[in-house]
Structures are given as structure tokens and as C-alpha cells.
Image: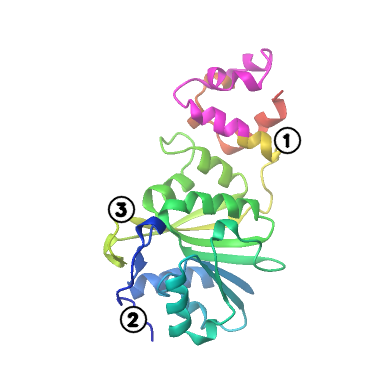
Amino acid sequence: MTNLSRPLNLKKSLGQHFLKDESVCQRIVKSLKQYPFKQLLEIGPGSGAITRSLIAIEGIEFKAVEIDKEKVGYLLKQHPSLKNRVIEMNFLLMGKPFEGPFTIIGNFPYNISTEILFKVLDWREHVERLIGMFQKEVAQRIAATEGNKIYGVTSVLLQAFFNVEYLFEVSEQAFNPPPKVKSAVIRLTPKEKPVEIRTEKMLFLLVKTAFNQRRKTLRNAVKSLFTEEVLKDPIFNKRAEQLTVLQFAELTWRMK
């Protein structure tokens, strides 16, 4: 049995904080099991705190991706059944791990968590669900709605394609070593009917341009993207954080 508190060499460059609280691990796995899945990818298994529960799930194909060679060796030693199921590489550089739909789970390294999400966004036609642990501030930003100061680029772009559920928060003491921030677990599920946009590229450009100068009115922040006639619309009197995801999507149809 894996010792969740066993000391392992931590690499700050990889943002490693190992989950050691068994009750938190079980809450995450319980959240995962609320929906059926056949293929599962764990990102950053680390010391295997969650992994040991995942490999016990029957009737699924399981893979894990881990960048740290030492942790891969540790996982294989603790769980021989993981042979040929642990991919030693940077998740941000890997190709799609399965044919057909798959679910993603992980205690994500906080220093690249946003990049992980944007890769998942690229894979959204194949990802049926994501359960992930994030820095609390990042999780709140992902789930934030219009009118909130932390509502921003990540909020809009993810919510355009996914339903976001803010599941629960996790204390610093659940980790070894304890991070300086609290954590939270969220679940992303692709929308059955994503918002209609002109193109994904246009949505990204509009949202990033709008929030790049979030204190300005939309008219001043995104004037380069619209004709003077379109900019007369009263919606451009608002600031970026006041627009709903749907309003951003609708504006893509009116861009130059």
C-alpha cells in the first residue's frame, strides 16, 4: 500500500505539492464516479495518492502522464500494474491518449494549470469530463460569472464550451508540503450545445483584447475589431467584465 506521507524529492520547478489526505482523495474519486466513463487519463499522479484508487476501478482503460522520472519509477515500484500505463512526458506536449471519448482527472501543478486547461479546450471534442484540483483563486476564476472582478479570459473561454461546477475546497494541510494557498476541486463537462460563435479564433481575439484593458469601456478596448457603425451599439458602453459569455459569442458575428 502506498504511504501517502512518504517523503519524496520535491521539485519546485514542477510546482509539486503532494496530496496526502485520504479523505480528500476519496472525495475527488467519488466526484469522478458520479458519471460513467470507459477511458481515464490522470495528469501528474506524483506520489500516487489518487492513482491507487483509480487503478482499482474495474472495466476502464487507465493511463497516467507524469513528467518527473523519479516519480514514474516510484509509481511503477508501488503499483506494478501500472507498467505500460504511465507515460513519462510533459502533458502539454503529448498527443491525444485514447481513441474515442475520455475523462481527465488530476491534482494539477499550479504553475501550469491554466495551460493544461487550454490544452483540454483544444481536445474538447474528445474530453467527456474533467475533475481537477486547482489553486483556489484559479478555480474561482474559472467558475466566475459576469460582474465579478475575477471574471476574465479563462472564465469566458472555458464557459463558452464547458459547464463549470465548483465542487469543494481543500485546506493547505492536505498537502506535503503545504502550499501557501488554498485549493479547490472543479468539474468541467462539455456543453451539449456550446454558444454559437463565428470562429474560435475570433472569440479568443475578442475576449483577450477586451480583458487586456478591462478598466476601459468595450468601445475603447476593442475598437480595432469593429467598424465605427457597430461601435455605436450601447453594449460597447460596458466594460469586459459586464458582458455574459453569450454576449461575447454574439459579438463575434459583428467583428470586421
Q: Is residue 242 visible?
A: no
Residue 242 in the image: state x and y as whole percent.
50, 30
Q: Secondary structure at mark 3?
A: loop
Give the image location of residue 21, x and y in percent.
32, 72
Dot 1 amino acid type:
Arg
Q: Is residue 135 left or right of residue 36?
A: left
Q: Main secondary structure of the magenta part?
A: helix
Q: Which mark is residue 3?
A: 2
N-terminal label among 1 and 3:
3
Q: At 36% across and 67% down in the image, what residue appears?
A: 18
Residue under the point 35% across and 58% down: 12
Q: Earlier in the sequence, mark 2 or mark 3?
A: 2
Please tell me which residue lies in front, 203 or 80: 80
Residue that numbered label 3 is attached to: 181
Q: Nearer the viewer, mark 1 or mark 3?
A: 3
Circle 2 residues within 10 Å: few <14, some 14–19, many ≥20: few
